[in-house]
């Protein structure tokens, strides 16, 4: 069973800030890692798959990186619509989500 | 455009069963695998199971084996998730999601709230 640890669990930031969220796995995911954004009452929205492939229509301020057991989602300049909860998901073996990172307004 | 439309909210008593449907449109139904993911109040999403709409093969997380049944009607382009022996811990929003080309979940249904209450 692959364990996925996401950090931090929450963060406060201001519009324009650079934000970084990290996901660590218990074994090599071979870049089988996705990032989702979820707003209250809505389904998760796929932002990044394959560790760094941005989904069509997702703003370029979002980027994913990493390999092996450590992965990162970066928002280069936080916008008002980016305040949400973000989840990583490994799909190297079955599918498992991280615990989430709530991005709040500072 | 791809759409996944789920059935409405349900309230069930402990020990009962629930069926949630997921109607797909905007793509070739049998070309993709559909997954079921649930999210308990205040918690992160939890993957439950999938069905390969091309051949009907299914797989579920071990904790749900014996309680979850995933089926489909290809003529209706609809998948179904049956969950039996409900407990209060099964109260959650249940989502269907399509598995994209690289195995992430690229399209999601709107979610179905299942409340287990006596």
Image (cartoon, coloured by chain):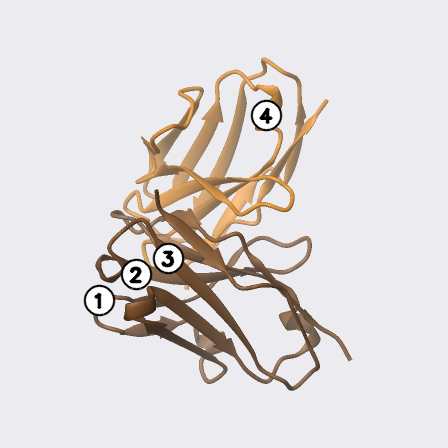
Chain colours: A orange, B brown
The mark found on residue A81 in the picture is 4
Q: Mark 3 points at which residue?
A: B24
Quadrant position of the C terminus of chain A in the picture: top right
Image x and y of residue A23, in percent? 47, 41
Q: Residue at x 49, y 36 (%)?
A: A22
Q: Mark 2 points at which residue?
A: B33
Which chain is home to disc 3? B
Which chain is home to disc 4? A
Q: Do labels 3 and 2 share a chain?
A: yes
Report how far apart the C-alphas of labels 4 and 1 lie in the structure: 38 Å
The mark found on residue B64 in the picture is none
Label 3 or label 4, whichever lies nearer to me, is: 3
Closer-to-camera residue (A81/B66): A81
Q: Name the residue under label 1.
A: B54
Upstream in the sequence, badge 1 or badge 3? 3
Image x and y of residue B52, in percent? 28, 66
Q: Residues within 10 Å of mark 1 (few under 14, many from 20)?
A: few
Asked whether residue A69 is in view, the answer is no
């Amino acid at each position: 069973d692959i364990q996925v640890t996401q950090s931090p669990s929450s963060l406060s930031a201001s519009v324009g800030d650079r934000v970084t969220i990290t996901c660590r796995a218990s074994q090599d995911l071979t870049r089988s890692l996705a990032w989702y954004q979820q707003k209250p009452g809505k389904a998760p929205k796929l932002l990044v798959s394959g560790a760094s492939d941005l989904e069509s229509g997702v703003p370029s301020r979002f980027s994913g990186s990493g390999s092996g057991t450590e992965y990162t989602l970066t928002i280069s300049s936080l916008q008002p619509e980016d305040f949400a909860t973000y989840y990583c998901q490994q799909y190297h073996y079955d599918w498992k989500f991280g615990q989430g990172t709530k991005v709040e307004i500072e | 455009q791809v759409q996944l439309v789920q059935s409405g909210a349900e309230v069930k008593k402990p020990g009962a069963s629930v069926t949630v449907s997921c109607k797909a449109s905007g793509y070739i139904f049998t070309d993709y695998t559909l997954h079921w993911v649930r999210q308990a109040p205040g918690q992160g999403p939890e993957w439950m199971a999938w069905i390969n709409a091309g051949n009907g093969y299914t797989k579920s997380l071990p904790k749900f084996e014996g309680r979850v049944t995933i089926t489909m009607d290809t003529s209706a382009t609809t998948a179904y998730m049956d969950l039996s022996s409900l407990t209060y811990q099964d109260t959650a929003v249940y989502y269907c999601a399509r598995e994209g080309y690289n195995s992430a979940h690229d399209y999601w249904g709107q979610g179905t709230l299942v409340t287990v209450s006596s």
